[in-house]
């Protein structure tokens, strides 16, 4: 049987080679990480979420976040903003930049973001949401999408889907939780499916994307079968595990060897160094990736603790090589653990995910430089 996810798909006039996307990930989806995910087959990747304020008032940090590596064949940008006017102004600028598609973030639950009337706050009121999408649509002819949750506190996933489609987006992504829920609540496939159906009834060729709790081939298939989505978007499942794209494209569980594992980490380190240089602040930025990669092997806990204190990429390289040399060549990651235990490690709560909620995306007035 043909693998659904390997089939090409179009978002408007943008041709994508497959149906497995990497989500925009604040603090994570930078050039080095995107390059790795693209090499493993991600069909679409995004820069980290930008705030309209930061774009409109030229925040230096977001200029760097907007960079595109020459190897990136396709790249999307995601933005959120406090008013339809501010968002439209930002999108007018982004439309002139080197992006293939633009997404409006209507799902971010971070308190500060919501307080500024951005992210998931946009979906509290359907009429307002419509104004936002229409204002953005009016200033760009690039493929446009929205990303939202099944609701803010009350479920209104059908309204969000309809509102997106009626205002002429080419794609929408549904994260199957409300903004009030955290990761301990499993995603609600039924509600994602309701949103997908509502959108498709209005416009049959809309691209509907399912997001949430996709950690392997099996959960990718489950998302597609239970929701009827056209594509999937992966977030936490790619952290420390870019193999997930290849796994889903090949339609089987992959067991990378320790050698392959080390090779990928060293490659990301190389890309990191090319992009940011090797210095203390950029190494500190990279520590989270190290910690995610350093999971699933015996003795990795003390190893992770060491990684949390490295101050140079050179030092990290040495530590990874030393640790890999202690592992038997044929050792499989997560070996010796029952499937359930491995799932717990992969899916379980990790305080690092909290950075989603803590990161400052330049939303609010402090970014007006
Ligand atoms: C570290 C981190 C950063 C995130 N940043 C963004 C972001 O910038 N934009 C966005 O739309 N969602 C962001 N999200 C939410 C994810 O894209 C996704 O909707 C959510 O994690 C559910 O998918 P998952 O269960 O596969 O992780 C972020 C999530 C994490 C864990």
Image (cartoon, helix red, strand yellow):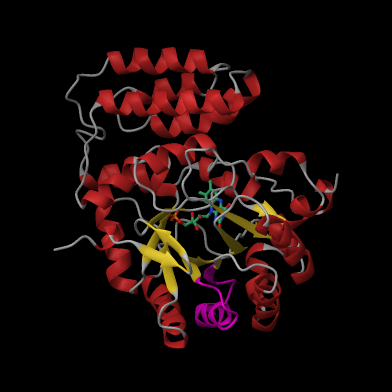
Q: Residue at x 36, y 69 (%)?
A: 230
Q: Position of residue 297 (x, y in %)?
A: 29, 28
Instruction: Judge left or right: residue 48 versus residue 230.
Output: right
Instruction: Judge left or right: residue 245 versus residue 128.
Output: left
Residue 105 or 311: which is nearer the viewer? 105
Instruction: Judge left or right: residue 310 versus residue 125.
Output: left
Q: Residue at x 36, y 15 (%)?
A: 321
Instruction: Reply above or below: 78 against 322.
Output: below
Residue 348 visible in the picture: no
Residue 140 or 212: which is nearer the viewer? 140
Q: Which residues are magenta?
A: 147-170
Name the outermost residue toward the left: 1
Splitting the image into 4 quarters, where does residue 100 fall?
bottom right
* Number of marks in picture: 0
Residue 311 visible in the picture: yes
Instruction: Reply above or below: 247 against 157.
Output: above
Residue 265 or 296: which is nearer the viewer? 265
Splitting the image into 4 quarters, where does residue 115 fall?
bottom right
Q: Position of residue 341 (x, y in %)?
A: 27, 43
Q: Position of residue 113 (x, y in %)?
A: 70, 58
Q: Quadrant of the N terminus?
A: bottom left
Instruction: Reply above or below: 67 against 148.
Output: above
Q: Position of residue 206 (x, y in %)?
A: 44, 76
Query: Is 101 a magenta residue?
Result: no
Instruction: Reply above or below: 153 against 318.
Output: below
Q: Quadrant of the C terminus?
A: top right
Instruction: Judge left or right: residue 102 versus residue 214.
Output: right
Q: Residue at x 73, y 66 (%)?
A: 88
């Amino acid at each position: 049987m043909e693998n659904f996810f390997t089939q090409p798909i179009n978002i408007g006039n943008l041709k994508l080679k497959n149906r497995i996307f990497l989500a925009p990930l604040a603090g994570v989806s930078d050039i080095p990480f995107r390059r790795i995910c693209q090499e493993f087959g991600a069909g679409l990747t995004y820069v980290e979420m930008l705030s309209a304020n930061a774009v409109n008032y030229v925040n230096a940090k977001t200029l760097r976040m907007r960079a595109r590596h020459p190897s990136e064949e396709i790249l999307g940008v995601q933005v959120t903003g406090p008013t339809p006017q501010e968002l439209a102004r930002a999108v007018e600028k982004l439309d002139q930049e080197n992006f293939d598609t633009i997404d409006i973030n209507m799902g971010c639950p971070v308190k500060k973001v919501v307080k500024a009337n951005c992210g998931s706050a946009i979906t509290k009121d359907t009429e307002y949401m419509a104004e936002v999408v229409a204002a953005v649509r009016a200033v760009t002819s690039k493929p446009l999408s929205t990303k939202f949750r099944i609701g803010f506190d009350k479920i209104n996933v059908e309204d969000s889907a309809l509102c997106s489609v009626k205002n002429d987006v080419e794609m929408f992504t549904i994260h199957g939780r409300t903004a009030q829920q955290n990761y301990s609540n499993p995603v609600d496939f039924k509600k994602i499916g309701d949103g997908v159906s509502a959108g498709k009834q209005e416009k049959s060729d809309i691209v509907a994307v399912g997001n949430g709790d996709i950690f392997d081939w099996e959960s990718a298939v489950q998302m597609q079968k239970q929701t009827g989505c056209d594509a999937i978007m992966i977030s936490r499942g790619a952290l420390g595990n870019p193999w997930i794209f290849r796994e889903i494209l090949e339609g089987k569980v992959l067991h990378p060897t320790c050698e392959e594992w080390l090779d990928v980490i060293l490659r990301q380190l190389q890309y990191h160094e090319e992009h940011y240089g090797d210095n203390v602040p950029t190494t500190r930025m990279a520590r989270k990736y190290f910690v995610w990669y350093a999971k699933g092997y015996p003795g990795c806990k003390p190893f992770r603790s060491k990684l949390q204190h490295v101050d140079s990429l050179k030092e990290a390289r040495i530590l990874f090589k030393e640790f890999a040399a202690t592992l038997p060549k044929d050792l499989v990651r997560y070996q010796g653990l029952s499937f359930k235990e491995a799932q717990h490690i992969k899916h379980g709560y990790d305080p690092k995910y909290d950075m989603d909620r803590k990161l400052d995306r330049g939303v609010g007035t402090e970014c007006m430089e």
